Image (spheres, rainbow, N blue to C red):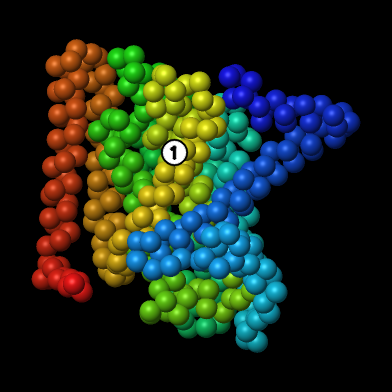
Amino acid sequence: MTKLDQIFVSTKHWLVGLAPEMLQSLASILLSIIPIMAVFGGCFAVTTILERKGLGRIQNRFGPNRVGPFGFLQPMADGIKMLTKEDIVPFQSDKVMHFLAPIVLTVPIWLAFSVLPFGRNMVAVDFNAGILFFFAAGAASELAVFMAGWASQNKYSLMGAMRAMAQMISYEVPLVLSAIPVIMIAGSLSLPQIVEAQAGYGAGWFPQWHVFTPWGLAGFGLFLVAATAESNRSPFDLPEGESELIAGFLTEYSGFKYALFFLGEYLGLFAISGLAVTLFLGGWHAPLPILEWLPSWFWFFVKFASLIAAFIWVRGTMPRLRMDQLLNLSWKFLVPLAVLNLFVTAVWHFSSNWQSFGGLAARWLMCGGLLAAAYVLLGRSLSRGQGTPRKYTYAE
């Protein structure tokens, strides 16, 4: 089973050994880049068709079912359509910035995958500060969005870009704050070391993942909400608000450039989901000791696929927020709760010598009670003054 677990690592070393000695470094780099691009490029195609089919089921309609068996060749048809469409560039636009914006969006996201550990010994680059590199690479997407809106010389595009910037900056703060408790507990900025800090099983069978602690559960929830907004996913898909802004900062894009923006959006979702698995869900560790015979990379992608399914489910069930609701949620609820979670994490750490069952229960009660009380108080203050709750009626 160790051979199966390390099959991709062994294959890479074997292929690198076949190259001439002077080219082995280049071969090693290429054999790290190409699989990442192939796997997550394939995930993009598979996710789009499964999402469209899943949303069709949720909304009681048909999804894609014409192209290929059960419609599963629809991503290929969409790719050919985007490649053959005319690339229309507005006459008054900034041609250079208009061209560079989709490239600036996608390239840094590919770089973010390089620090994610997909399995045991399966990380392209093991930086000592890998999590800082991940957030730094992801921050380039804000620049790309503003470039697209500004370069288009279109009021709708510029307004969409400004709304997107406000949203992404607002939610990047709780996103980073929710990851800091993990760094505090693990004592490292290296993502493989954070995964190793979640190894082992309590009482012989219970996984020691961060999500199974009060601060970890709160941080995981905060991280997912902020990640949904950072990825422009429903109910936070205001930057592309079709009913208000046509397509937001994408209004003046067509053809393959338009497709690159959607590729970047999905790649960002994949990267942030992989980071959530690494920080809170034990990375590539199995949920039970009896299941450790399965390869480590298998468990990473099972958790990864589960999070993607959850994002699709949320998109099909929740309505879009208003802009004021979106900003209030971030600054008045998520940020204060994330800051409080830092304090709760410190309390959890310094009470680690409470090893008895009663001490562990008191530890849980103290930390969980603080977070629950803050959740209720912040939630009530946020909902105060919102007016009469909406009433929805459904056809019988």
Q: Under tag 1, what secondary structure? A: helix
Q: Position of residue 327 (x, y in %)?
A: 30, 63
Q: Position of residue 208 (x, y in %)?
A: 35, 24
Q: Residues within 10 Å of mark 1 (few under 14, many from 20)?
A: many
**133 sits to left or right of 376:** right
- Quarter holding the C terminus? bottom left
Q: Is residue 76 above or below residue 379?
A: below
**45 sits to left or right of 189:** right
Name the residue located 79 percent from the left edge and 31 percent from the top edge.
15
Q: Is residue 190 above or below residue 103?
A: above
Name the residue located 47 percent from the left edge and 71 percent from the top edge.
161
Q: Is residue 171 visible?
A: no
Q: Is residue 369 above or below residue 36?
A: above
Q: Would you name the residue on which mark 1 appears?
A: 303
Q: Which residue type does callout 1 highlight?
A: Lys
**112 sits to left or right of 393:** right
Q: Position of residue 152 (x, y in %)?
A: 57, 79
Name the residue located 62 percent from the left edge and 52 percent from the top edge.
41
- Quarter holding the N terminus? top right
**In front of the other: 267 or 327:** 267
